[in-house]
Every structure is written in structure tokens, then in C-alpha cells.
Amino acid sequence: MNPRPDNRGAAIDLESVTKAYGAFKALDGVSLRIEPGEFMTLLGPSGSGKTTTLNVIAGFTDVSSGKLLVGGQSVVGVPAHKRNIGVVFQHYALFPHMTVGRNVAYPLTLRGVGQEERKRRVAKALDMVKMGDFAHRYPSELSGGQQQRVALARAIVFDPPLLLMDEPLGALDKKLREWLQLEIKRIHRELGTTFVYVTHDQEEALVLSDRIAVFNRGRIEQVGTGRQLYDEPATLFVGRFIGDSTVLRGEARSDGTGTALTIAGETVAAPRRLAG
């Protein structure tokens, strides 16, 4: 897809990335291009490799082989704290002894940003997640959804070119989750930052994403828009995993003038898309 004209995000390139633990390959030759400013969701069941991929991009996990580039630069071997990447986890990881404002300011403090500039950026980040009135509260005084919004503000306050989100809504109830999905989509649109989002929830992936990479057993089965994955699954796994599907086994034959599809002894002309 074309990068967004107003984006400030970084491109990500994974080229034949493998992560092995002994004989087990958590990632097995994963290749993926994520465009600047794109919202890419890594979707798959537990153990499919989606979170390992996120951890590799973040720098929490080293690759066994392959290339990983962020903004055109190799980051293989670069420590996580030097990659300038924002990360939001399912469990908010807020400091309980710090106010909301100090939690959000923490990445700026580490970077040596001056006090006045810190105040300005913290106020801007909290306003973006609609938590501007909560700067002096403590995490224990907030709901789960409010804590997650604070965690998001902390991840974007230093203007990273890339934001990684690991099942950030998994601990929230359905109604709140659906509302925050729309908020995350709005924030992505306003920031123009590259978002990489991990989930096992296909509905969430379809709502949020520009494109979706479907993982299975350490490999990518298919990459595409939600509509492409739903209408034209490339594999049986994708067809069963995305949406509600009925799978009919059959045989397709072409004689040069057309394609026929035989299912359960009945032969019909194949749909134009299949025939092509």
C-alpha cells in the first residue's frame, strides 16, 4: 500500500527472520514489509509467532537469523532502549507510586528533556487520549480502561516513529474494548505513526487495520486487507480463521475454454474469480 502523505512513521522490513529455541522454530523464515504510517495487525492463534515477531521488532528477543530493518536501518543487535520505539502491553506496567503525569513523563525524563518541555508534551499526550484531567491521580484511582489510556500516552509522548501494541485490550470488557478500538484508530490517524498491533481477535483486527498478517506455526499464511483475507483466503487455515466459513472440498478442472468445479459428485461452472 502507499504510505500516508502525512505520516511520521518508520517502515519495517523483516527478511527471512528465524527465531529458534533449540530445535523449535518460533519464527520460521518470516518476511514482511510494513509501510511508513501503516496500521499492521499481526493476527493468529496462541503460539503462532505473532508476539515473538513483535518482541523481535522491539528488541526484547534476538533473531537467530535473517534481517530486520526499521526506517531502512538494521537494528539486529541494537538494544531495545536504543530503538526509540513505543510499546504498550496488555498489562499496563504503570508505576504505582507515580502520578499519571509522572508516569507519562518518565520516557522524557530518561531522555533528559527539560521540565517545561516535559509539561507541554505530557499535557499534549494526555489530551490526545482524553485523560487531561487525570494528571494528578495515581494508577490505583483509575479504571482498567483509563490505565490503558495512560499507558498509551506514555508510549507516544516522545514521538516515536513506531508504536508496538501487544494485545492491549485483552483484559477489558467487550463494550470498553470496542470504544477503545475506535480511540486507537483515531490516535493512529492523528499521529501518522506506524502501528504494529498483536491480537488473536479477528474482529478487532478487521476493525483497526490497514492490513493484517495472519500467522500460523511460526510462519505468515497471508498478508492483506481485511476484505482480501475474508473474500480471497490464500490457504485453508486463513479461510477457517477469518470470519465464519463453510469449507467444501472439491476438484477444479480446466479444459482451456472454462473451469468446472466438482463437489460431492455435482459439477458446476467455477466462479469467475476461481477460474481466473
Image (cartoon, rainbow, N blue to C red):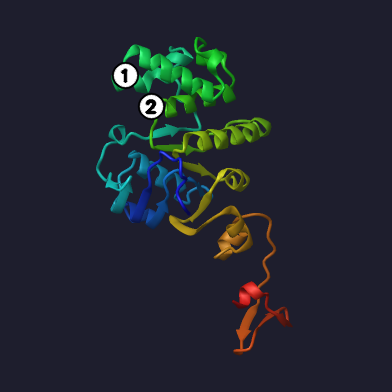
Residue farthest to the left, as pictured: 77
Looking at the picture, how far across and down is residue 76, in whole percent? 27, 46
From the viewer's perspective, is 270 left or right of 100? right
Residue farthest to the right, as pictured: 266
Residue found 65% across the figure and 77% down from its top: 250
Looking at the picture, how far across and down is residue 193, in whole percent? 44, 38
CB atoms of marks 1 and 2 within 8 Å: yes
Q: Which one is nearer the viewer's eye here, 187 or 85?
A: 187
Mark 1 or mark 2: name the one nearer the start of the chain.
1
Q: Which residue is mark 1?
A: 113
The amino acid type of the residue labelled 1 equals Val
The quarter of the picture where residue 37 lies is top left
Looking at the picture, how far across and down is residue 86, in whole percent? 40, 33
Looking at the picture, how far across and down is residue 49, in whole percent? 44, 50
User: Is residue 118 shown above or below 9?
Assistant: above
Q: Which residue is mark 2?
A: 158
User: Is residue 199 shown above or below 30?
Assistant: above
| Residue 92 visible in this rendered orientation of the protein | no
Residue found 62% across the figure and 59% down from its top: 240
Provide the secondary structure element on which disc 1 rests.
loop
Neighbour class for label 1 at 10 Å: few (<14), some, many (≥20)?
some
The amino acid type of the residue labelled 2 equals Phe
| Residue 259 visible in this rendered orientation of the protein | yes
Residue found 68% across the figure and 70% down from its top: 248
Neighbour class for label 2 at 10 Å: few (<14), some, many (≥20)?
many
Provide the secondary structure element on which disc 2 rests.
loop
Q: Which one is nearer the viewer's eye here, 242 or 28?
A: 242
User: Is residue 71 shown above or below 259?
Assistant: above
Q: Quadrant of the C terminus?
A: bottom right
Residue found 68% across the figure and 78% down from its top: 270
